[in-house]
């Protein structure tokens, strides 16, 4: 995996959490010190691209609610 900021390959997973249908990983670039999150979907065989995108949208909305304490209009710092 490459860093989305500097394209370095010196990217490491610093935290990994499994959920029912996906894995969320926190990643860190050693070169530019950028931290970001990746989500890996675990879709059953035969899942269409539209179904996978719908699941991903649901996961993102759920993550936003958790990170803002249920206040969707709160800004993360």
Image: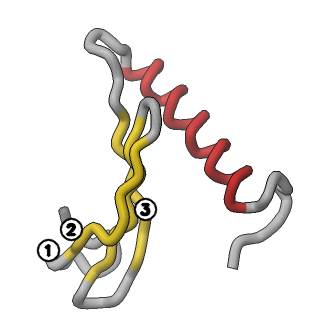
Foreground: disc 3 or disc 1: 3
The quadrant the N terminus occupies is bottom left
Q: Which comes sooner in the sequence, label 3 or label 2?
A: 2
Determine whether 21 is above or below 75 in the image. above
What is the quadrant of residue 68 in the picture? bottom right
Marks 2/1: CA–CA distance: 5 Å
Which labelled disc corresponds to residue 2?
2
Residue at mark 1: 9
Q: Label 1: few (<14), some or many (≥20) within 10 Å?
A: few
Point out the residue furthest to the top here: 46
Which mark, by number, is residue 37?
Answer: 3
In this picture, is 61 found above or below 64? above
The location of residue 63, given as percent across then percent down, is: 62, 50
> Do tag 2 and tag 1 residues touch (Cβ < 8 Å)?
yes
Q: Which residue is drawn at 47% across and 30% down?
A: 53
Q: Is mark 1 on a helix, strand or loop?
A: loop
Task: Please state the horizontal and vertical placement of residue 48, each as a whole percent of the image.
Answer: 37, 15
Q: Nearer the viewer, residue 20 or 60?
A: 20
Q: How many marks?
A: 3
Q: Is mark 3 on a helix, strand or loop?
A: strand
In this view, the residue in front, 65 or 3, is: 65
Work out which quarter of the rendered image holds the C terminus and state it.
bottom right
Q: Where is residue 76 in the image (x, y as percent from the top left)?
A: 71, 72
How many angstroms separate mark 3 from mark 2 (CA)?
13 Å
Q: Is residue 49 above or below residue 46?
A: below
Neighbours of disc 2 within 10 Å: few (<14), some (14-19), many (20+): few
Mark positioned earlier in the residue sequence (3 or 1): 1
Residue at 14% over, 74% down = 9
Q: Earlier in the sequence, mark 2 or mark 1?
A: 2
């Amino acid at each position: 995996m490459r860093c989305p900021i500097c394209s370095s390959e010196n990217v490491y997973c610093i935290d990994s959490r499994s959920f029912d249908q996906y894995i969320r990983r926190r990643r860190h670039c050693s070169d530019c010190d950028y931290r970001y999150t990746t989500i890996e979907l675990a879709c059953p065989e035969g899942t269409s691209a539209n179904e996978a995108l719908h699941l991903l949208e649901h996961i993102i909305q759920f993550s936003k609610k958790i990170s803002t304490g249920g206040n969707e209009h709160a800004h993360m710092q």
